[in-house]
Image (cartoon, helix red, strand yellow):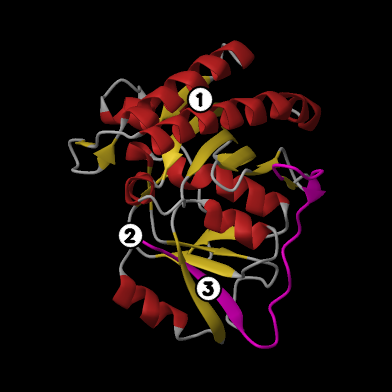
Amino acid sequence: MNAAARAALLPGVIALARAAGEIVLRHYRGGFTVRRKGDSSPVTAADEESEAHIVAGLRRLTPDVTIISEEAASRSENETAAGLEARLFWLVDPLDGTREFVARNDEFSINIALVEDRAPVLGVLHAPVAGKTYASSGPGSAMLHGADAAPRPLRVRAAPAAGLVVLASRSHGDKPALAAYLEQFKVAERRLIGSAVKFGLIAEGAADIYARLGPTMEWDTAAGHAILAAAGGTVTLLSGAPLLYGKPGSRNGDFVARGGWGVGPI
């Protein structure tokens, strides 16, 4: 899919993510029941209704493109092998940060990404409580759409002389291993934040690095990866190799997302 076609799709995907955010907020403000999936992770009706809305919308926008989404995968309704065979497919996390949603700390997001040739090429990351929507459709296209403000372009920042602002998962990851990994960097501040919003904060120049040592799934990272890459950042394995998509089982290895300061320590 060429850049013009992706750009033409983006407004429709943004609209889907925002509408899904309204669905999620209705449950968040009105009450919900938490159930457990087979892997013991939480799920609510907000996850499921958001997913149904997004998947139906993507099928209207791109009827011939495979869709891989989190809740369908947990019910074994996704044919994830189709993503391995397809050059082009959607990855959807209808409510990223369900634990944060359940804890009512506002740190959750709606993630939608288009993957082509194993790389995320379009991403929409919507934070419903903040009313912020990060979006991109290719290099140099990353934008932040605020609730009441005109969209503004996103660009990562250079490493601050005072040290890096580090983002870490509030509820996941190997914290001792992360602490050991970060010893190679000059760190000014560490913040715990839930969901893929961490990618957006690096893309807008509010932070510098997010290292995840522990399991994630491709739908957790693809939208944020697309946006951060479009803003001039990188997402790689700890070795520096690219983080690729369409892997068997859809599981990611340990990775690091960075702003505008390359792949080596500072």
Residue at 33 percent across and 27 percent down: it is 45
Q: Which residue is mark 2?
A: 172
Quarter of the figure that contains the C terminus = bottom right
Residue at x-position 33% and y-position 59%: 171
Q: Main secondary structure of the magenta part?
A: loop
Residue at image coords 35%, 22%? 79
Q: Quadrant of residue 71?
A: top left
Which amino acid type corresponds to the residue marked 1 in the rendered image?
Ala
x, y percentage for residue 28?
41, 38
- Name the amino acid type tagged 3: Val
Amino acid type at circle 2 is: His
- Residue closer to the observer: 35 or 38: 35
Q: Earlier in the sequence, mark 1 or mark 2?
A: 1
Disc 2 + disc 3, Cβ < 8 Å = no
Point out the residue furthest to the front here: 30
The span from disc 1 to disc 3 (Cα, nearest Å) is: 35 Å
Q: Is residue 245 left or right of residue 178?
A: right
Q: Using the rendered image of the protein, determine whether residue 140 is visible from the camera's viewpoint.
A: no
Whether residue 194 is in magenta: the answer is: no
Is 81 on the left or on the right of 258, as rendered? left
Foreground tag (1 vs 3): 3
Query: Which circle marks residue 86 in the picture?
Result: 1
Residue identifier under label 3: 166
Residue 151's image quarter?
Answer: top right
Real-space CA distance between mark 1 and mark 2, rounded to the nearest whole angstrom: 30 Å
Q: Which residues are magenta?
A: 146-172
Within-10-Å neighbours for mark 2: few <14, some 14–19, many 20+: some
